[in-house]
Amino acid sequence: MIELKHLKTLTVLRATGSLTATANSLYLTQSALSHQLKDLEQRLGSQLFLRKTRPVRFTAEGKVLLDLADTVLPKIQIAEQALANSKHQTTARLQMAIECHSCFQWLMPALKQYQVLWPDVDIDFCSGFSFDPIPALAQGELDLVITSDIQPRNEIHYEPLFDFEMRLIVASHSPLATKSYIGPTDLVDQTLLSYPIQRHRLDIVKHFLHPAAIEPLAWKQADNSLMLIQMVSAGMGVAALPNWAVDSFVRQGLIVSKPLGTGLWRRLFAAVRASEYQHHYLKAFFATAKQQCQQHLQGIKTV
C-alpha cells in the first residue's frame, strides 16, 4: 500500500514546503504529483497535509509517514551503498575544508552516516578561514571543499547541495528589528560581525554591500556561529548567517532575522577535482549530505 516513492515524496515536500517546489525537485508535473498524493490519501483514508498552508503543514497521519520515512529511507540507502561497496572496495583519503562554521550543524551528522557506509575512507579537516582552499584543492592538498564561493576552473567540479538564504540577524531591541527588510544603506551605521575570513569573500560583502558601494561603520570577528549569535543578541553588532543556522535562535526570541533586500539566496556546493568526482566514495558523500540536509535543515531549497 505504502511505496518507497511515497515516502521519498513526503520527505521532499517537508524540505521544500510547497507542491510546486516538490514537483520541480522530483522532475514531475504538478498534476502527476497531485495524483500520486491523492491516490495515497485515498488508499489510507486520511489527509496527510494541509494544502492551503505555506509551508505545508502535515497532519498527524502525515507525520506518522514522515517518521517512517526517516527510519526506512536511511536504512535502504545503507543497504544499497553496502551492495555498491562490495563491488567497489575503496580505501581513500578525504581531506576537507569548510569555509563556514555554520556548516558543522549539518555536516557532522552527515559524516557520521557517511562513515557507516564508507568506513575505509579516512576523513580529516583543514580550516577554510586562513587560506583560499580552492587552489589547494586543485593542487591535491585537499580533496573536498564545502563552499558557496565558486571560482570557475576547468579542473574543479562543483556539486550542488542545496540553496539557502542569507539573513541579517539583529538584537530584538535594535531599530532594524522593526524593518520588513534590510537595505544596504541600513548598515552604514552598524558594526558588522563576521567569521575571520577575508572580507571580499563574504557573501554579504560580495553580493549585497559592494554592488551598492556601501561600507559598514565597523567590523568585528568571531570564530563560530554561536559566538556571533550571542554577540548579536547582546547588541554588539549585526551579522549575516544562513537561514537554517539561525532558525532555532529566532524561534527562542534571542535574535530577530531579516531578509537582505528581496532575499539573498546562495547555493552551497561540494567542490572536488573534476578528474575524481565520479569516484563512488565521493558520489556517496554527495548523496548522504543532500539527504541529511533535506531531512534536518529548515528553510533550504533542494537542487
Image (cartoon, rainbow, N blue to C red):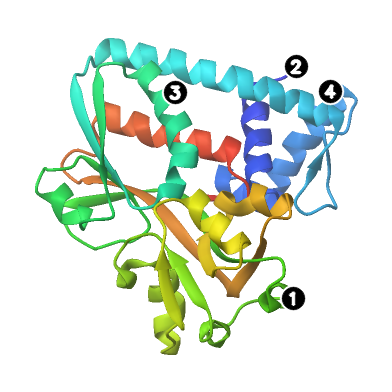
Residue denoted by label 1 = 178
Cα–Cα span, label 3 and label 2: 29 Å
Q: What is the three-letter code of the residue carrying label 2?
A: Met
Is any part of residue 27 visible from this angle?
Answer: no
Of the image marks 2 and 4, the number of the one nearer the N terminus: 2
Specify few, some or many for label 4: CA neighbours under 10 Å numbering under 14, 14-19, or 20 or more: few
On the rendered structure, is 242 left or right of 222?
A: right
- Label 1 amino acid? Thr
Side (left or right) of 40 relative to 195: right
Separation of marks 2 and 4 at Cα, in angstroms: 7 Å
- Asked if the residue at tag 4 contacts the one at tag 2, i.e. Cβ–Cβ closer than 8 Å, the answer is yes
Q: What is the number of the mark on residue 113?
A: 3
Q: Are marks 2 and 1 in contact (CB under 8 Å)?
A: no
Q: Secondary structure at mark 1?
A: helix
Q: Residue at x 44, y 45 (%)?
A: 103
Q: Residue 27 location, x and y as percent?
A: 56, 46
Nearer to me, 165 or 49: 165
User: Which residue is the site of mark 2?
Assistant: 1
Q: Which residue is mark 4?
A: 43
- Tell me how far mark 1 sits from mark 4, CA to CA: 47 Å
Which mark is in front, 3 or 1?
A: 1
Return the residue nearer the eye: 86 or 125. Answer: 125
Is the residue marked by circle 3 packed among few (<14), some (14-19), or many (20+) residues within 10 Å?
Answer: some
Q: Tell me, yes or no, whether the two marked residues, 3 and 2, touch with CB atoms within 8 Å.
A: no
